[in-house]
Amino acid sequence: MPENRFDPSGYLTFDLSRGSATLPDAASAVILPAEVLERIGDDRDGGGPGTIAHPLGEWVGARVRDRLGAGGGSPADASPAAFLAETNGLLAVHGLGRVALETYGDALLLRADVAAFPKAGAGFLEPFFAGLFGAFLGRDVPCLALDGPGGPCVLVASPPAVRRAAQLKSAGILPETIATRLHQESRAAREGK
């Protein structure tokens, strides 16, 4: 398993004679100002943030999976710290921000500081993380965007837990309280209470 450190050296290569940039997997890269990406994802242009968020999340998730699986290990066996280090490293070298992860039993609460999209809210974060975790795990992963005093965040959990979280969200309950209740309800169900 690779170390829990992301090494950005040599990640992006510029060929000034050809006017191109490439990534380690020889994929072409285009570097755009954040304002351009915000316009691409702007609802006024008929797209919306989800237009770029889900595919971008899938792209990041596939690369995290490949990097953590290098050397023959299963990416799904990586520690949360290794997953977070690779994810944050990739987000950073692309100027996309950082993610913090909070665990509440079987549910994850992700807080994102999306530098490239300072106005990113639910319309961006939910499809981004659904794409990221879906590509990383190779299956659909239910996500629910929440907003609270700490800013926007995303809950990642089982389908029943996400449905329950949506009920609690509609009742105006804060994200941390939602995640705590889901954990308590899950524990009580396992213990038969």
Image (cartoon, rainbow, N blue to C red):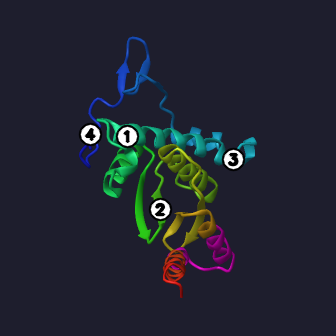
The residue to which callout 2 is attached is 110
Whether 176 is among the magenta residues is: yes
Instruction: Tell me which residue sits at (72%, 48%) in the image.
Output: 43
Relative vertical location of residue 11 with respect to residue 16 in this rendering, above or below = below
The residue to which callout 4 is attached is 7
Instruction: Tell me which residue sits at (35%, 51%) in the image.
Output: 77
Residue segment shown in magenta: 163-178
**As shown in the figure, which amino acid type bears the numbered disc 2?**
Leu
The residue to which callout 1 is attached is 93
Instruction: Tell me which residue sits at (74%, 46%) in the image.
Output: 44
What mark, if any, has residue 3 been given in the picture? Answer: none
Report the magenta stretch's main SS: helix
Instruction: Tell me which numbered mark, 4 or 3, is placed earlier along the sequence.
Output: 4
**As shown in the figure, which amino acid type bears the numbered disc 1?**
Val
Pointers 4 and 2 in contact (CB under 8 A)? no
Instruction: Tell me which numbered mark, 3 or 1, is placed earlier along the sequence.
Output: 3
Where is residue 102, by image quadrant? bottom left
Pointers 3 and 2 in contact (CB under 8 A)? no
Whether 76 is among the magenta residues is: no
Instruction: Tell me which numbered mark, 1 or 2, is placed earlier along the sequence.
Output: 1
Instruction: Tell me which numbered mark, 4 or 2, is placed earlier along the sequence.
Output: 4
The residue to which callout 3 is attached is 48
Left or right of residue 186, residue 81 in this image: left
Q: Position of residue 91 (x, y in %)?
A: 42, 45
Left or right of residue 8, residue 137 in this image: right
Instruction: Tell me which numbered mark, 4 or 1, is placed earlier along the sequence.
Output: 4
What distance separates the C-alpha of mark 4 from that of mark 2? Answer: 23 Å
**As shown in the figure, which amino acid type bears the numbered disc 4?**
Asp
